[in-house]
Image: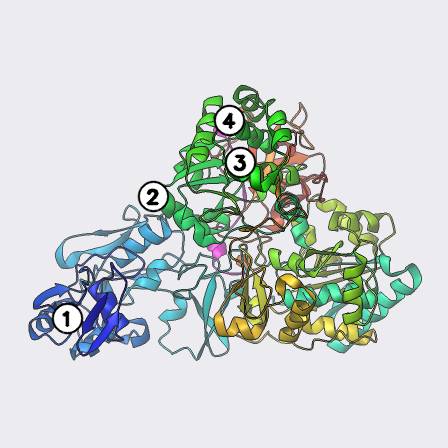
Amino acid sequence: MRVHVDVTTVDVPEGATVLESVRAAGAELPALCHDDRVSPRGSCRTCLVGADGRVVAACTTPAVDGMRVSLADPVARGAARGALELVVSELPGRAWDVPAERSELVRACACFGIPTDRSARGGHQRGVDHSHPYVKLDRDLCIACGRCVAVCAEVQGTFALDLTGRGFDTVVTPGDGGSWVSSPCVGCGGCVDSCPTGALSEPGLLDPRPTTSTTTTTCGYCGVGCTLDVHVRDGEVAAVTPTRGAPVNRGHACVKGRFAHGFTRAEDRLTTPLVRRDGRLVPTTWDDAVRTVAHRLAAVRDRHGPDAIAMISSARATNEENYLAQKFVRTVIGTNNVDNCSRLCHAPSATGLSASFGLAGGTNPLDDLDHTDCVLLVGANPTDAHPVVGARIKQRVLAGARLVVVDPRRTELAALADVHLQAVPGSNVAVFNGLAHVLITEDHLDHDFLDRRTTGFDALAELVRDYPPDTTAEIAGVRAADLVAAARLFGQARHPAIVYGLGVTEHRHGTDGVRTLANLALLRGAVGTPGCCGILPLRGQNNVQGASDMGALPDLLPGYQPVTDAAVRDRFSAAWGRPVPERPGLRIPQMFDAAIAGEVRAIHVIGENVVQSDPNAEHVRAALRACDLVVCHDVFPSRTAEHADVVLPAASFLEKDGTFVNFDRRFQRVRPAVSPPGGAASDFAVLHRIAHALGADLGCPTPADALAECAALTPVFAGLSHQRLDAGGPLHWPCRAPDQPGEAVLHLDRFATPDGRAALAALPHLPPGEQPDGEFPYLLITGRRLEHHNTGSMTRRTPNAELLPAEALEIHPTDAAHLRVVDGADVTVTSRWGRAALTAHLTRDVVPGQVFAAFHFPGATVNDLTSPHTDTATGCPEYKVTAVQVRPGPP
Ligand code: FES
């Protein structure tokens, strides 16, 4: 429809407001209580305009075709000015110290020509709340617009804030009126970003000095891939804000991406290469470090052959660094012994989704959750581990979508679920087969889809006859009625979505779990069809997807092209000028086994703290001790670096150029906002230097060149380039040509399997690697916390450590009473594989007989406990099931 705004005419969609029409016309109009992301409040009256002869609040008034809007309407303008003058009259002079770019209030006053008085003594002397390390409240700057309250409720879904008091005393208040830090606030920063006055601010923005540059980049924490604006002052990161309108996060973020950037200037950053001499790591020059690495790698290769060298590439590193790493190993060293930490998390997704659908990625974009009417959330705690996705799911549920959660713990989303199947760890395949049983017996099937686009239905139907609700309930420890209710919710939904995490993959039969979960989408025709919501695997680290996409895998070249395929090898060999070895290399757990067996003599680790993150830590330590050479790139000293012969100081994601691929297959640009400190350098630059010292030239001198080379060799990435991403923003892969958009939704015409059909999988439930017994009577589940990321090397060096300073063992009060353990008491946890000292946290979020801990803190040594059992198909460790005993007291 057409709307006339003063002398400009604009076309706006049906349903647009007058304010949206004004903005479409490029005109400025104060709107102090309005935020596009939340429902309009219409309370401040600063947006009054004339519209077809009436005075209306632009933010709440729908535009109509042919409407004439007058911003200069004297009655409207006078009333708006009066409303603003009333607001301003109550404010102290420091309100005008907030820079105009951060204060809509300052800009609004300028717009109306309202004088500002820095010496004004307004305000109600209500004081500040600086209790939270990140969110700072100056109550006297609060104008009670309610935007922060609305964002907390309607974007984040935490409902931590309210407006309290009356009249001019009205002020934002966290929680039940106590301090901000003791409120339910999750530190997403949404309130700070929306505040129009600076009443809510953050440490980096309280500094009145202007920032000098802003760089848009991609977050380096979890795999959601939020777009962030990094604001720099004096060469240091001053603040990070989510980019408004960004495709993935839509201007939202979490307490990690939004605030946890202080690690970049931590005092213990590695800034100088270290070489072990006389048993001690001592500083050295880059030339000496690179020469040492090259010389000793060459010695191992010459003496024991190339297969005696293994590299663990990094899911934290960029695509271009991973591309270069696997090229280095394959062409300079001459082995396929390269792997990345997706081995430890989502290798079963890659293998399982490839087997079912033909491609190793989630099938749909995050945006498709906007129209789902039922989410099946399995083995994932996204409000902690992927908070932006967690908030999006929560909003869908608040809007009426049904939610089924399969998780042994009562997570935040489980507490909101219509059905929570608290299945015993290790019983996923039984649960999925049981759900399939109900879908089939109650005929919640898309028969046409199954006939035309799948294979294997008869075998699946035959198998799941053995999983009626009673039988499944007994295996999984859930109620049969809940299982049936869950299947009906999923089966009767028009647009069911499946979101899953490591609770599906990190099992002895994790690949079977992925495949039997994929069955559920196929039975409903909920994947590869128009309007479907598909399957979304939530990736743990920022570039888990990309590290594998780039071929940092022992059996696959970039784009999942098999190294055993002679034609593929020939193509890469011709382009690289060196032969690609034919024999698949070792997976990470096999690398450690081979090191202990004396077959691998050198391990080169890029950006992973394997001693803390990998299972059965003593086995990992033994493997590193057995090597002749351990090389380690890292940002900080780590438990892995303690075993290294050479430690190379690495740049962090805020200091790098390249791309990441997020969990829904989007290539996104990573841009350096600041320089690495001291001598720290990107893994990209370091790999080039080591190759050069070994007499080789890896080509592709810049990250842009590396992606271009990868694209030229990989059909599914052929349309990707830095230039295109810079010009047009993120692109999904597959992206097969420079003039084609990426494929956000996969498999719409055919599945990528050889016959074009998806393969239903008839797979039985098999027991996990360990079961509780008399000696180890509890099941330990491991996972993540909101405040920290992975091994905590970045978040522990920020004020996030104030929000969560230590790890604790979650234990049910019944078990605690049996053990005579009180909340906060020391406990010793022992498994067949190791021991850990923790404090007890009594909670009913775990069921009796199960305990939970995260592995973010090196002192907690949780991965000393986890077992060497791995997924039978991929070698992914079984982090989610370890039999342990718990004893009161320290070790
Ligand atoms: Fe319209 Fe406040 S922005 S009334």
Which residue type carries mark 1? Arg
Does residue 702 appear in the picture of this structure? yes
SS under mark 1: strand
Which residue type carries mark 4? Val
Which is more foreground, mark 3 or mark 2? 3
Which is more foreground, mark 3 or mark 4? 3
Q: Residues within 10 Å of mark 2 (few under 14, many from 20)?
A: some
Whole-Å distance between the Cαs marked 4 and 2? 27 Å
N-terminal-most mark, 1 or 2: 1
Q: Residues within 10 Å of mark 4 (few under 14, many from 20)?
A: many
**Is 421 or 214 nearer to us in this picture?**
421
Which residue type carries mark 3? Leu
Which residue type carries mark 2? Leu
On screen, residue 690 above or below 794:
below
Say whether residue 812 is magenta.
Answer: yes
Which is more foreground, mark 1 or mark 2? 1
Residue 68 circle label: 1
SS under mark 2: helix
Q: How is the image coloured?
A: rainbow
Q: Which residue does the numbered mark 2 point to in the structure image? A: 398
**Is 644 or 508 nearer to us in this picture?**
508
Residue 198, located in which quarter of the rendered image? Answer: bottom left
Which residue is painted at 83% across and 52% down in the image?
626
N-terminal-most mark, 3 or 4: 4
N-terminal-most mark, 1 or 4: 1
Q: Which residue does the numbered mark 4 point to in the structure image? A: 438
SS under mark 3: helix
Q: Magenta stretch: give its range.
A: 797-814
Q: Percent position (x, y) of residue 5? A: 19, 73
Residue 523 circle label: 3
